[in-house]
Amino acid sequence: MEKKVAIAGFRIAAAPDLETTRERLVFDLSKGLLDDLGITRDAVDNFVFCSNDFMDGRTISHVFIGPAAGGYMKDQTKVEMDGLNAMIYASMGIISGQYDVTMVVALSLTGSQASPYLYTDYSLDPTYDRQLKLLNELSAAALEARSYLTAGGYPEELLDVVAAQDLKNAAANPGQARRIDGVSRERIKGSPYYYEPLRELHCYPPTDGGCAMLLVSEKKAKELTDKPVWLLGMGRSTDIYYLGDRDLSTSLSAAQAAERAYAMAGIKDPASELDLAEIMSLFAHQEPLLAEAMGLLEKGKAAAAYEAGDTAVEGRMPINPSGGPLGAHPICATGLIRAAEAARQLRGEAGENQVKKAGVALAHGQDGVCAQQSAVVILGT
């Protein structure tokens, strides 16, 4: 890219119940981030918010959180649903030269104030699927899981292996909402079924939370931080086929979004050129499914890669070293959190979960039933 964009800083919050309001959550994240960087709202010339009117229970929901973020009398806009799309949109404003400093804020209180699955029901076909009441986010994910396992010739135990790795990483990450000490495959296998083959611990937990991130131009990056994380490439894609017509054993949207991000970043062989990946996998099977679609794992070899430890923090392709969405999924913020967690790794600030010599990372976000829409960014030092 001709003009560079950097992450100057970020703040994350996640818990089953934050016992707060949306406005207070936004204030705490935004003010905390500005304090971290030693600046005030006057230094920010643009705000991009990411929330969902339906889940908030009010239209044009960002008008209520703009003032709490310090966005009054400033340019501001909103991106619906996943926060990684908001990050990409905000980056475009900086690349265009219109802005130098943009704050992105994504949030939801779906752990304590709304059903995390309800909104998905209302995105289904209203004349058929919604009336039958057979499909919902969980049952659709179960169909996706079964399709993936069957196509790859994988046993159901792969889901236990993936979940055990992610929940182990999440337990060592203070920023996660679900932290289970000493989690084992046996404990995961003993959790109740939601829809076969998905069990409770294969699925994301309802979560309150949010993320605030400051994106800046190259000039401002030099002024605000000595640890800039640069945006090297980005891509988005939406699968044109409706749920019933899609091949659920893979993800066309993730493959296309990654391909576009790789091309922009000049990456030819992602499996060898990337040091880690933060993937928005809301269910255990989605992590290897999306990793294969994006060329991080060889198709049909995911089970062997997980069993060999290749995807662990110390492996050759660490996937979700933060614990990923199985540790926390504040809807609307999860994709932005993936970028923040990747940036934390690249800054060498990931504590027990730090990947050695992390220099280039992928962050993935999704929206829609079974990841119908995907966004991918490539970050580097």
Image: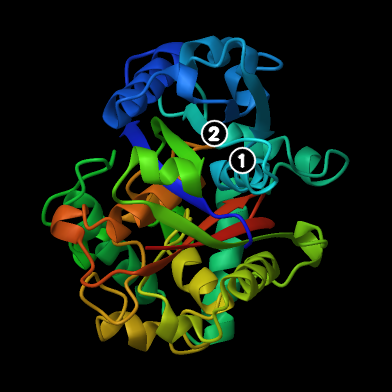
Residue 134 screen position, x and y as percent: 68, 48
Cα gap from disc 1 to disc 2, whole angstroms: 7 Å
The residue under the point 63% across, 61% down is 2
Secondary structure beneath dot 2 equals strand
Residue annotated with mark 2: 102
Left or right: where 70 falls relative to 56: left
Q: Quadrant of the N terminus?
A: bottom right
Residue annotated with mark 1: 90
Residue 343 screen position, x and y as percent: 36, 53
Left or right: where 103 falls relative to 375: left
Label 1 CA crowd tier, 10 Å (few <14, some 14–19, many 20+)? many
Residue 305 screen position, x and y as percent: 34, 85
* Residue 325 position (above or below residue 268): above
Secondary structure beneath dot 1 equals helix
The residue under the point 88% across, 40% down is 127
Left or right: where 36 falls relative to 281: left
